[in-house]
Amino acid sequence: MRVADGIASRLRPTSQSALRRAERSGRNPSTGSIAMPSFPSLSRLALPLCVSVLAACSRAAVVSTSAPPAQPATAPTLVTDPDVRRLLGALAADSMEGRGTATPGSARAAKFIAAELARYGVQPAGDSGFFQRVPVAFTPRNGDRQLTLLATLAARDSVPAAERANAVNVVGVIPGSDPALRDQVVLVDAHYDHLGIQHGQAGDSIYNGADDDASGVVAVMEIARALAAGPPPKRTVVVAATTGEEVGLLGTRWYLQHPARPLEAMVANLEIEMIGRPDSLAGGPGRGWLTGFERSTMGDLFTNAGLPIVADKRLDQQFFMRSDNIAFAERGIVAHTLSSYNMHNDYHEPSDDVAHIDFAHMTRLVDVAVRAARLLADTPTKLEWKPGGRPEPRNRQ
């Protein structure tokens, strides 16, 4: 989650020197030692994943042209504590080096997420298998070198080699099954980047980002697994793990220009962020809050289905404006973020690690997130902005 405009920031941009140090660091035992490949070779990295997905699809049963019965919000989702621990433990491990945008640790995380989606039977929806290449480069700004989103993939070739960087979103799709609804799209996403390695300070230098936002990515992965396992959703569901949120919504801004499915077909976006610890203002363990609850009918939909999701009570923090959902909301898409962030002191600190995650709470809230996604995918109700709820577009640099 990004700091809001006008709110004191502890965000430390990833410097180019930090990236170079990260490139010389160790291996990830679970995924092997990799570096983000150059853009032309991304297709070769993605090919084994694509082959496995296509093979899985060929073995799957043919979807009936008639719509399956809607799965109730109370149906079992099979979210388990061991699965949640395994996924979060991998994403927030020291070997992921804080998942700084365009770092080797980020590449490892992207590969891990893509491999999981392939294992679930999710269809790849990037431009290179599950990977959607995001063209970024270092540019001088405020006395430092910071990552900037380029206009096109080709523009990266005109940037000096020393200034180029590799970044990807991870994108998959579960096709809709209902003849009347399958052309409508629901996007469920979370950002997998965090702050990377920050040198020159005492103690731990790895910003693991267990709560922010490995926890949200785990929820997206579990949603993908549940929907792919069936019954198939009525609407088409795109799942995405985006990069560059902490440095200016870079991955989301690129996705808006190059969506996996047309934005005109997108009827809802559920962003999931920081659900690793319970919040007393949401009602305690297993409960979450929705940013901008009062702005649209999404919150009402969840309430009427009995989901333990309440309104964000910290409106002064402007959480609705501080995550990837805002970029879609400004386009007119009903878009909100599910969270249980309790204002803990580990935000954007090395202490945001696996040891501080409340897994009993998180497993329950991931289960809630799966039910919420299923509801968005299957409900015949069209979500709408309430009067005055849609935000006005802002200029982004």
Image: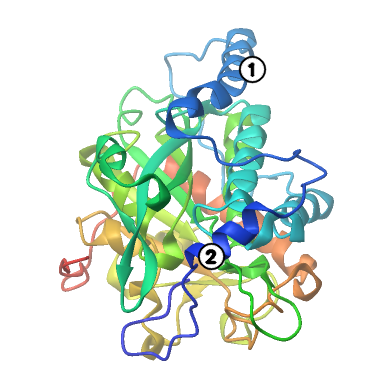
Pointer 1: what residue? 52
Nearest to viewer (mark 2 / mark 1): 2
Quarter residue 283 falls in? bottom right
As drawn, 350 above or below 82: below
Measuring from the top left, give residue 16's x and y in whole percent.
Answer: 48, 63
Q: Kindly state the secondary structure of the residue where label 2 is placed.
A: helix
Q: Amino acid at mark 1?
A: Ser
* In front of the other: 395 or 380: 395
> Would residue 274 be found to the left or right of residue 380 on screen?
right
In the image shown, does 230 or 40 lie closer to the viewer?
Answer: 40
For the residues labelled 2 and 1, say whether their Cβ atoms are less than 8 Å apart: no
Percent x, y for residue 114?
60, 36
Quarter-of-image position of residue 221:
top right
The residue that appears at 58% across and 43% down in the rendered structure is 110
In front: 126, or 72?
A: 126
Q: Which residue is mark 2?
A: 17
Residue at (35%, 34%) from the top-left corner?
A: 260
Q: Residues within 10 Å of mark 2 (few under 14, many from 20)?
A: few
